[in-house]
Image (cartoon, grey):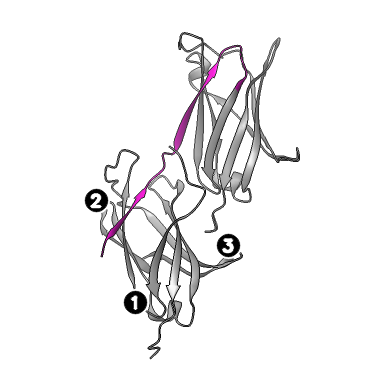
Amino acid sequence: MARIYLTQPPLQRDFDLRSGETARGFNAVLNSGDDMVLRFTNRNAAGTAVTIAAWTGITLNLYTQAGVLALTETGALVGGGTGGQFDVTLTPANTDTLAGTYIAELQVTGTGIKLTPLRGTVQILETYIPT
Amino acid sequence: MSLNAEPKGPLNMVSGDIHTFLFAVVDEDGAAVNISGYGIAASIFTVTDGQPVTPALVSYTVGAGVTITTAASGEFSVATAAVDTAGVSGRHYLEIETTDGSTKDRTIGRFWLDIVADLITA
């Protein structure tokens, strides 16, 4: 009998943000009810990481196509943010009841800072084994 | 990495059979993943109007239908018991989820499963 190969998805997915701009091409595809870390890196036009240590508030929200808030998650700086990185950690419970394509918006705040560095979509594939 | 919205397959089996599906877990580069210590859950769901229906028709876990055959090569099997699919036929849905040693949940398999009604039902 032929063996069927199953690709194990990574537990972390990496995305780049362009410093000072709103990335609108963001499109992530996730399985509902899975563990996943979304790691973002803030870079300048040359691709060099730009510190985000002053970003004291990081919020990633998902909205339905009708504009209803479906999920809100707080990001955490990696290494204090000097390497331009932060994580948004999703646990199974965060997405277990979600399925479909959501509008994603990321907002960061700090002293004198209020930015939307990302707009895009997150497609969540429905899975059926309970978490 | 990209995930496909549509389940793969279909896999096929005959209702009422003791059927073994063989799987191997690989990473995105195609290298075998050592699944020692993994929890593996596999469930078969009926499908109505193209959508799986919960709860599952039958579920399997390691030691109860799922056997890790060669952990270092990522190989495991899922074996149905005759009673599991007796009297059922048509399109079904098979989902496989793993929990690794750090208890991270990952859905690694989503398949359509077509079950053909057996004629010899004894």
Real-space CA distance between mark 1 and mark 3, rounded to the nearest whole angstrom: 26 Å
State whether residue A58 is above or below residue B79: above
Q: In this image, A126 relative to B22: left or right?
A: right
Residue segment shown in magenta: A1-23
Please determine whether, in this image, residue A51 is positioned above or below residue B86.
above
Residue A5 is inside the magenta segment: yes
Position of A43 compared to B68: left or right?
Answer: right
Q: CA distance from mark 3 to mark 2?
A: 34 Å
Of tags 1 and 2, the one toward the viewer is: 1
For label 1, the crowd category at 10 Å Cα-Cα, with few meaning under 14, some 14 to 19 and many 20 or more, is: some
Q: Earlier in the sequence, mark 1 or mark 3?
A: 1
A13 magenta-colored: yes
Q: Which residue is depicted at the point 75% across and 40% down?
A: A68
Tag 1 and tag 2 share a subunit = yes
Residue type at tag 2 = Ser
Task: Looking at the image, tell me whether mark 3 or mark 2 is earlier in sequence order.
Answer: 3
| Image: B5 above or below A74 | below
Could you tell me which chain the residue with mark 1 belongs to?
B
Q: Which mark is residue A89?
A: none
Disc number lying in front (1 or 3): 3
**Pointer 3 with pointer 2, Cβ within 8 A:** no
Q: Chain of mark 2?
A: B
Rounded to the nearest whole Å, what is the CA distance between mark 1 and mark 2?
24 Å
The residue located at (50%, 39%) in the rendering is A36
* Label disc, if present, on residue B18 of the rendered structure: 1
Q: Which residue is mark 3?
A: B50
Amino acid carrying mark 1 in the image:
Ile
Q: Position of residue B52 (x, y in %)?
A: 56, 63
